[in-house]
Structures are given as structure tokens and as C-alpha cells.
Image: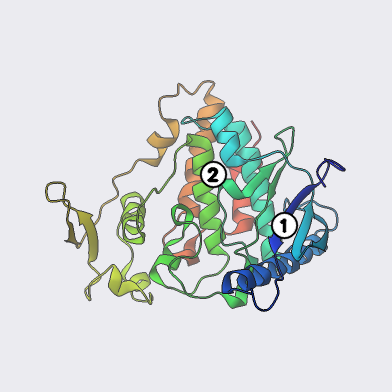
């Protein structure tokens, strides 16, 4: 296929096997493939002029019991872009502004179609050959907003919103949270919350934003795994001497991270215009990364934010 037409991107997944050999894995793969096909069609139909930065599906077909999806040609994902052009230091603020705007437009289309992507991260965002145009891809975890299943492991861990970890009903805010984590990573070259467990993820969130509000904690189906009856945080820490896990009860957690300092890093931000853009980015991220999803920036608020609106 690639030799015949290198303009196309082709992906195949198992969809049908003989009944005797059918395994749960193959059947799940079959269902996932068909569900992704349906979601891609819905998104493409909702954006006939290709203005909202979600991957275009050209066609699909079955080949030797595999479902094959033929996509538009794209070059590399943002994880690869970071590795090649911004390893450990991130990308220029000009590129981050452009990529952020395009990512928010993709979220706008998802909301219009009532779809949650549920796995936004640099690996699932592709760019074209010139690196100027971005497309959100990999809708294998996506679902209709009304079908949201309460599970603590939805979304890749580093990009997982607090409401998922706590077991609170969620909506489009989970994709906005993941987008915020992704944008931070694009600019700094570093993962924003690199927790090894859900418990550690919550600790890292609170290191940035302060203690989780009690009213949010009480809504969580999984709150008892992380908080006691008085909403004190139960931090599962590994003792440095014995290397055994111990639970540290934390009644108060004060913010200990300085987002502005993290974004500026060791750069001497001249001209002043560049420093202004970084301050705007800090403000945008503060608004996106709200522990209470009802207070999180909406897609339209993100798109009209000065960081996006004022070009550099």
C-alpha cells in the first residue's frame, strides 16, 4: 500500500477471526476499531472544510480480516518534534502559541460532536511535513460524552485529570486538563506531573494548586484510597531508608511550585514581548489546571485568551 501511494497513511487493526480462534483480545480490538471508525466519521462530517484540526480519514477497507483505515499523510508526532527540536528545553513560544490554538480548535470540534478524546498527549498529536499544521489523532479511547465510565485509569497517567483519579463524573474538562499538561510540556520540554501512581499524581497537583477542596473530595467514588474521613490526604510515600511504603497523613498542603519560574527557566527572555507571552502562558495554564473542573477554563475562554489572541 505504501509503495503504491506514499501520500496516504494506513493503519490496520484485527477485526475478524474465525470463531474457534476468536479471543477476547481480538473481539475487543474489533469493537475498538469499529468504534474509532464511527467517531472519526462523525468528526470529519462535522468539519467538512477541515478547519478544526482533527485527523482526516480518507477511506477504510477490510484486508485479510483486518480493518484498514487510510488517513491523510502526516509527518511526526509532537513527542518526536520535542525530541528533535526541543529536547529538555521545549519549543519556541511562537510555535507553542500556534500549536495551542490548533489544539483548542480540535477540542471545540470534539465538544460540538459530543466526543471525549480521553487520551490527549504529545504522542497523539501529529504535525504535517512543514511542522506548521497540527492534527489530533488516535481516537481509540474516545467515547460519547454520555457514555463516560467511572474508572481511575482513563487517560495516560501523566495527563489524567483529578476528577478521573477521584472517581467523579467527568465531561469535556478532562481533555482540557490533558491539553494544559501537553502545552506545558511543549514549552518546557518537561512532563508537568510525572507521578508514578494516581496517589502521587494527586500530591503533585496539590504541590502546584494547594489542597484539594473538601467538597470536591467528598464527591469522589475513590476518595477513600487517597483521603481519610476528615479529607486529610493519605500520601503513600516510600521510606528512603527501609524502602517500604508508608502512609503520611497531610491535613494541609501549601503550593510549593512556582509556575512562572518553571516556564522562564534559565532563559533570558528578551525582547520584553517574549516575557509577556510567557506570563500570558502562565495565566492560561493556571486557568486550565483548576482542580475543580467546573472552574476550569472553557474552550472558548482558552481560544480568546491573550496568549492565543496576541501573535508574537
Q: Nearer the viewer, residue 213 or 68?
A: 68
Q: Which residue is painted at 61% across and 71% down in the image?
A: 28
Which residue is outermost to the left?
Answer: 241
- Total residue callouts: 2
Where in the figure is residue 82, as x and y percent of width and height? 56, 34
Disc on res. 23: none
Q: Nearer the viewer, residue 37 or 30?
A: 30
How many neighbours does mark 1 have within 10 angstroms: few (below 14), some (14-19), or many (20 or more)? some
Label 2 SS = helix
Of the image marks 2 and 1, the number of the one nearer the N terminus: 1
Residue bearing mark 1? 12
Q: Nearer the viewer, residue 12 or 251?
A: 12
Please tell me whether residue 307 is drawn above or below residue 287 in the rendered image.
above
Q: Which residue is painted at 69% across and 61% down in the image?
A: 13
Where in the figure is residue 174, as x and y percent of width and height? 52, 62
Q: Which residue is painted at 22% across and 72% down in the image?
A: 228
Please tell me whether residue 211 is drawn above or below residue 219 in the rendered image.
above
- How was the colour assigned to the protein in this rendering? rainbow
Disc on res. 183: 2
Quadrant showing the C terminus = top right
| Residue 293 appears in view | yes
| Residue 297 appears in view | no
Amino acid at each position: 500500500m505504501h509503495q503504491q501511494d506514499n501520500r496516504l497513511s494506513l493503519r490496520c487493526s484485527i477485526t475478524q477471526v474465525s470463531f474457534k480462534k476468536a479471543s477476547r483480545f481480538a473481539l475487543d480490538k474489533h469493537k475498538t476499531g469499529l468504534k474509532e471508525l464511527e467517531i472519526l466519521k462523525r468528526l470529519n462530517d462535522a468539519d467538512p472544510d477541515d478547519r478544526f484540526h482533527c485527523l482526516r480519514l480518507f477511506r477504510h477497507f477490510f484486508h485479510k480480516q483486518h480493518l484498514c483505515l487510510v488517513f491523510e499523510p502526516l509527518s511526526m508526532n509532537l513527542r518526536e518534534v520535542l525530541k528533535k527540536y526541543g529536547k529538555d528545553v521545549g519549543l519556541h513560544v511562537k510555535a507553542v502559541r500556534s500549536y495551542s490554538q490548533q489544539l483548542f480548535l480540535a477540542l471545540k470540534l470534539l465538544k460540538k460532536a459530543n466526543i471525549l478524546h480521553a487520551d490527549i498527549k504529545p504522542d497523539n498529536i501529529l504535525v504535517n511535513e512543514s511542522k506548521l499544521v497540527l492534527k489530533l489523532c488516535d481516537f481509540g479511547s474516545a467515547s460519547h460524552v454520555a457514555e463516560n465510565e467511572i474508572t481511575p485509569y482513563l487517560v495516560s497517567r501523566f495527563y489524567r485529570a483529578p476528577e478521573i483519579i477521584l472517581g467523579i463524573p467527568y465531561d469535556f474538562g478532562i481533555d482540557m486538563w490533558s491539553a494544559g499538561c501537553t502545552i506545558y510540556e511543549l514549552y518546557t520540554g518537561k512532563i508537568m506531573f510525572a507521578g508514578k501512581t494516581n496517589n502521587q499524581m494527586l500530591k503533585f497537583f496539590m504541590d502546584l494548586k494547594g489542597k484539594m477542596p473538601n467538597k470536591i473530595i467528598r464527591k469522589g467514588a475513590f476518595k477513600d484510597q487517597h483521603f481519610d474521613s476528615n479529607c486529610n490526604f493519605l500520601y503513600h510515600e516510600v521510606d528512603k531508608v527501609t524502602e517500604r511504603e508508608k502512609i503520611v497523613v497531610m491535613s494541609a498542603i501549601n503550593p510549593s511550585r512556582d509556575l512562572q519560574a518553571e516556564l522562564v527557566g534559565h532563559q533570558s527572555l528578551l525582547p520584553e514581548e517574549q516575557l509577556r507571552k510567557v506570563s500570558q502562558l502562565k495565566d492560561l495554564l493556571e486557568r486550565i489546571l483548576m482542580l475543580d473542573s467546573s472552574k476550569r477554563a472553557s474552550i472558548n475562554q482558552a481560544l480568546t485568551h491573550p496568549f492565543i489572541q496576541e501573535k508574537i
